[in-house]
Image: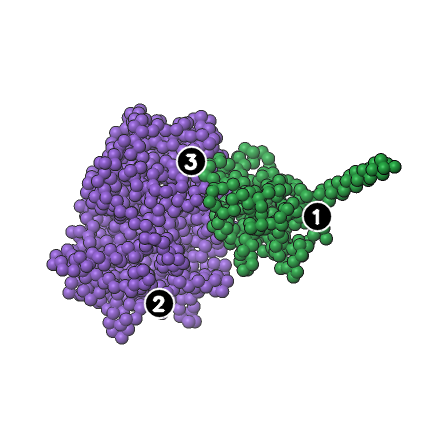
Chain colours: A green, B purple
Amino acid sequence: MSRWTRTADPAADAGWKNAPPRKGFFTDSSICIGCKACEVACKEWNGIPEDGLEMLGMSYDNTGSLGASTWRHVAFIEQPRRAVAASGLTPLPVVAARPGENRSFDGAETGIRWLMSSDVCKHCTNAACLDVCPTGSLMRTEFGTVVVQDDICNGCGYCIPACPFGVIDRRQGPPGTRNVGIAQKCTLCYDRLGDGMTPACAQACPTQSIQYGDLDELRVRAQHRVDALHAAGVADAQLYGADPNDGIGGAGAFFLLLDEPEVYGLPPDPVVTTRDLPAMWRTAAIAGATLLAGAAVAFVRARS
Amino acid sequence: MAECHPVGFQWVMEAKDRGATVIHIDPRFTRTSAMADLYVPLRAGSDIAFLGGIINYILSGEKYFREYVVSYTNAATIISEDFQDADQLDGFFSGFDPKTGTYDTTSWAYEGMETAAAAGSRAVAGRQPPAQAGGGGDELGGRGAALPHSEVRRDESLEDPFCVFQILKRHYARYTPEMVERICGVPPDQFAKVCEAVTANSGRERTTSWVYSVGWTQHSVGVQYIRGAAIIQLLLGNMGRPGGGILALRGHASIQGSTDIPTLFDLLPGYLPMPKAGVHGSLDDYLTSIKSDRQKGFWTAADTYVVSLLKAWWGDAATPENDFGFGWLPRINADHSNYQTIVDMLDGKVEGYFLLGQNPAVGSANGKMQRLAMSRLQWLVVRDLNLIESATFWKDGPEIATGEMRTEDIATEVFFLPAAAHTEKDGTFTQTQRLLQWHHKAVEPSGDCRSELHFFYHLGRMLRERLETSALDRDLPLRQLVWEYPLLQGDEPDAEAVLREINGCHLSGEKAGQLLNSFVEMKADGSTAGGCWIYTGVYSDGVNQSARRKPGSEQSWVAPEWGWAWPMNRRILYNRASADPAGRPWSERKAYVWWDEAAGKWTGHDVPDFQATKAPTFRPEPGIGGPDGLAGDDPFIMQSDGKGWLYAPSGLLDGPLPVHYEPIESPLRNAMHTQQSNPTREMFPRTENLSSPSPPDLGAEVFPYVVTTYRLTEHHTAGGMSRWSPYLAELQPEFFCEVSPELAAERGLEHLGWATIVTARTAIEARVLVTDRLTPLTVGGRVIHQIGLPYHWGVGGGGAIVSGDSANDLMGVSLDPNVHIQESKAAACDIQPGRRPTGAALPRFVEAYRQRAGLSVDTGTTRITPPGDGT
């Protein structure tokens, strides 16, 4: 099967025999308390260097974005009193009531909402970074995740513009740290998964906002959660990256958001940047063949 | 709670998932507010008005749990007719002495106990001889003060005008929703939602819990904040029941442990008061003053706890003939609490100082006073993970930059000893639920880092070696100490041996050498030893019970096999109150412990906190004291009358009931009484500790804003554990102030720009975070702006990854009289755009503010506010 065709089982598609069920993350931002334990646990486990000491003024987010030395990033979005009141948004990330239970409050009491969500590499079903990697450093694991092999990467950087989410980057420094110049991103703790352990971020998350497990099961759980939130009146709750029919064939790490993806700095409709490569190659091949044919005709005519 | 205790907050999220309503009341909108169903901003320092408003709502709306209140609290108890309330005396209770600023609490007593209290049992009634005035109250731990006896007159119809219930009703009648709005800035409709939610969620079927932290304790009336919540919980029947209670969140992992086995000057282990000089000459003097055999409850066995403690410390040298070595205990002669000690240091009265995991140069109020004080020591020992600011203030503190201190003038010899982290040593943490949890050493400490246990064991060993041949009496206590602990790798004492010593053992008789299973086994004849009676049982059956880690899924929902809770592994104290007077659960839903009539004993999900076979119908003969004096419906077994105290007849120094007073630095006149602030507060009027004026004094407009301090998830307290860690420092790299868009507009503050914040103490600079999470409040017809400051940063220190001005430098030192905690959660300030002056220009800048406000050492020290509004 072609790498650019939609697939339900990327590990088998990559040639793994008897691969375990595909693993992933479901990050439920409605119960994220913004503690950033995921960021710290990730860095501790993976030995990632400090990534800048600048105050950004983006609410309590001084991390800014994912990058070579930031594999988990908690976004903080303050939606002001006036804007929330005027927009008709659900003011707070309320937790769903059980059926038949009356909640004392409708959640409309604060007039401000403070959204928090922990972003991470999406481990796309159709992963452009992997597609464009000329060395084979980026690989699909038996768990269906996408991992950089540090000892193979030559630092060409093709993967960086290929990622539709801006996740992967080359480590710039500081000097003396590991893997400077090499492409770096979340491995979904490949070195823990092999031992049956939970990835560090999910292990550290105190509220189970980050859930790790079999992707099929996570998707079912997420759908239940979003249904419950809708039933509780949180109309804006939506899943992001959970649909296998989206532009990346569904994400291995997907999210429950309480507002539009753009609010969290996520592209609203991500598309694998290599989606059009087959068509482009076909066009190029036709063009090349046409050129060759033309040259041949010219050559033959010239000889004759 | 999400902000400072994110790991514990998982249980709030789980409760929420099960349908719990979460209400957050706080001056700033935090990560907790973001998860709450209802967020209520209020003015810092106005909480008693808020809590009093809820009490008034409960009483006037007949929302209290009548059966619980009548049977389990002192609501029916008749108070002395001499008592006069704050509503009669405009902010004072009867018995105030303007000269000393203290109360004679005789008139607060239960009816019939006034004379008994005055006739020689003064300490029993919670008072101290005049010479001790200002020395603070007794530390009482988990119990009320002693009573001379437990024979009280009760009116269970609750209609006697002198019963506690009627006094409470009159006392809180003025705490109306309108008054709450006028003082707290909380609109009546929002306040009504809180009242309705709290009362609707309390009763037979449901319980409500209150959670607080230093936002309540760090006030000049902090103890009374907690008392306010306690009154609500008793009126609603939320004590001793699952899902109820008042949960104190601690600032560190084992702060509970550090009061159980105390680092406080006025406590011995297990909440035994420290003996006082000139009062407690003999063991007998001491015992008769801390308990009365005619009061009810388990505190009457205090003699067994004290003697066992003395036997644990002095072993064979402690004999009946020498009062078990009671004379070797140090005595306290005055207030030696933290801030008083700092003031004594300033005056050159203190030679040496140990700092263990504490960074007062950054973490204590009035940082400059802290640093000046330490510069007058002869020696200072700092044991910490990192080279904190308190170890380097003498070369790079803010006063070196301003020229107020010069390194060459400071004679303090500083010893820095690197400490082992909790992962590098064995031991326990005791958390807020009184749960002891053992932690195992995971790695050896690196380099010269050593545990506190190592440090103190070997310090004691070397001191004892030096004193071996001493013939001086004063050296006897050290020479006679039991100081034998097995040493493990690296000369590290065996921490489990210490825990066994704390647990206690039999010294003679058949069971000699065996560990105690319960403090009930302790004897006052010297046949048992135990280092902290409430911890007895942590090593029951010879097993370190605190090391148990059975997963919750493999045991009952109370999870008794996870760690060990004092006392006796009880997870909820006073849980007799979870059953009705007849011993039946209040409801099936809230069943916890109950009386099993067939078996003739108490049973349930937890260890019953009651004498196991005492029937609910039991009534003692009059005059019987101790545990046998408890009736079958007296659930509060450590209280001297067996009841929960809505009204505290003794034990508190500033009143039997909470009253709203303004913070010492307030922009507003007290709307409740002429008396502006707590008349019994402890003050340190001196040039290093100036206060700004509050109404009715003039000059308050120079410092027009309210400033409060707090923590962020990303850092830990004064930063010693987080600013040196790159992974934490990068998450909140710079000191900032949080201001509302409205205040930013009023003062021209720019987001991410700089601001200078000024109080009577000093001026500091911070980056500006303009946020809707701070909101101006309309209070008493005025718009009040509040400024929020996280207090994690400091100047100086060796190797910190991030640093910045310290918020605590802004705060003054005035104390709650009961527990000597400073008012650092509400102060008055000004804020201006731009960076602060540096060098010698900084003190001049602050001095100009002081002159404009007319500050002197006496500002803000008036105990009795003169009549007239002065605004």
* Rendered view: A91 above or below B702: below
Q: Amino acid at mark 1?
A: Trp
Residue neighbourhood size for the residue with mark 2, other residues' Cα within 10 Å, grouped as few (<14), some (14–19), many (≥20): some
Q: Chain of mark 3?
A: B
Q: Are marks 2 and 3 in contact (CB under 8 Å)?
A: no
Return the residue at label 3: B736
Tell me residue B194's x, y (percent).
47, 43
Q: Amino acid at mark 2?
A: Ser
Return the residue at label 2: B540
Mark yes or no: residue B656 visible: yes
Return the residue at label 1: A4
- Is label 3 or label 1 in front? 1
Q: Is residue B695 left or right of residue B25?
A: left
- For the residue pair B743 and B469, the one nearer the viewer reads as B469
- Is label 2 or label 3 in front? 3
Q: Chain of mark 2?
A: B
- For the residue pair B122 and A202, the one nearer the viewer reads as A202
**What SS does tag 3 mark?**
strand
Residue neighbourhood size for the residue with mark 1, other residues' Cα within 10 Å, grouped as few (<14), some (14–19), many (≥20): some
Tell me residue B331's x, y (percent).
19, 52
**What SS does tag 2 mark?**
helix
Residue at x 78%, y 39% (from the top left corner): A287
Residues at marks 2 and 1, CA–CA distance in whole angstroms = 66 Å
Tell me residue B415's x, y (percent).
26, 47
Residues at marks 3 and 1, CA–CA distance in whole angstroms = 49 Å
**What SS does tag 1 mark?**
loop
Quadrant position of the C terminus of chain B in the picture: top left
| Number of marks present in the image shown | 3
Residue at x 31%, y 37% (from the top left corner): B396
Discs 2 and 3 carry the same chain letter: yes
